[in-house]
């Protein structure tokens, strides 16, 4: 699938940089195409992600390598690092 992806810079977004750090994604299929744009990605300082969003993203990525329970344990430990030791965190991964 990676061979079907094209990445390029556009004059629009280069002209708006650094105030806007956006992107346009266009998906083509047999029926046509659809495009979506964002001015600022989620997680940028002007568009911060909530702790719940960060936790969900972490969990979904961790699940690619860990079981559901392991991912939840690591997530809980990371989200509560103020009360966890480094050895506790390392023992989970």
Image (cartoon, helix red, strand yellow):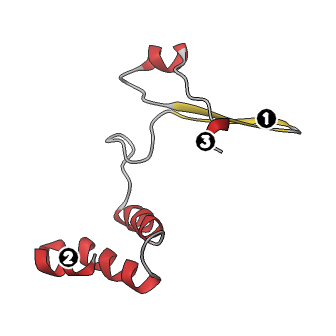
| Residue with the mark numbered 3 | 2
Q: Residue furthest front?
A: 3
The percent position of residue 50, horizontal first and vertical second, equals 37, 59
| Residue with the mark numbered 1 | 33
Tags 3 and 2 touching, CB below 8 Å: no
| Residue with the mark numbered 2 | 89
Quadrant (top left, top right, bottom left, bottom right) of the N terminus? top right
Q: Label 3, label 2: how many angstroms apart (C-alpha)?
A: 34 Å
Task: Determine the residue positioned at 67% across, 36% down.
Answer: 4
Q: Which mark is residue 25?
A: none
Question: Left or right: where does residue 28 sit relative to residue 40?
Answer: right
Q: Quadrant of residue 86?
A: bottom left
86 versus 12 height, above or below: below
Mark sitting earlier along the chain (1/2): 1
Task: Determine the residue positioned at 39% across, 65% down.
Answer: 58
Quadrant (top left, top right, bottom left, bottom right) of the C terminus? bottom left
Tags 1 and 2 touching, CB below 8 Å: no
Q: Secondary structure at mark 2?
A: helix
93 versus 2 height, above or below: below
Q: Nearer the viewer, residue 21 or 9?
A: 9
């Amino acid at each position: 699938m990676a061979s079907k992806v094209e990445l390029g810079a556009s004059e629009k977004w280069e002209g708006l940089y650094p105030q806007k750090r956006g992107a346009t994604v266009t998906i083509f299929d047999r029926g046509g195409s659809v495009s979506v744009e964002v001015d600022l990605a989620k997680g940028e300082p002007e568009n911060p992600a909530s702790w719940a969003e960060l936790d969900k993203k972490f969990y979904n990525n961790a699940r690619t390598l860990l079981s559901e329970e392991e991912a939840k344990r690591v997530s809980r430990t990371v989200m509560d690092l103020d009360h966890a030791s480094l050895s506790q965190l390392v023992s989970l991964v």
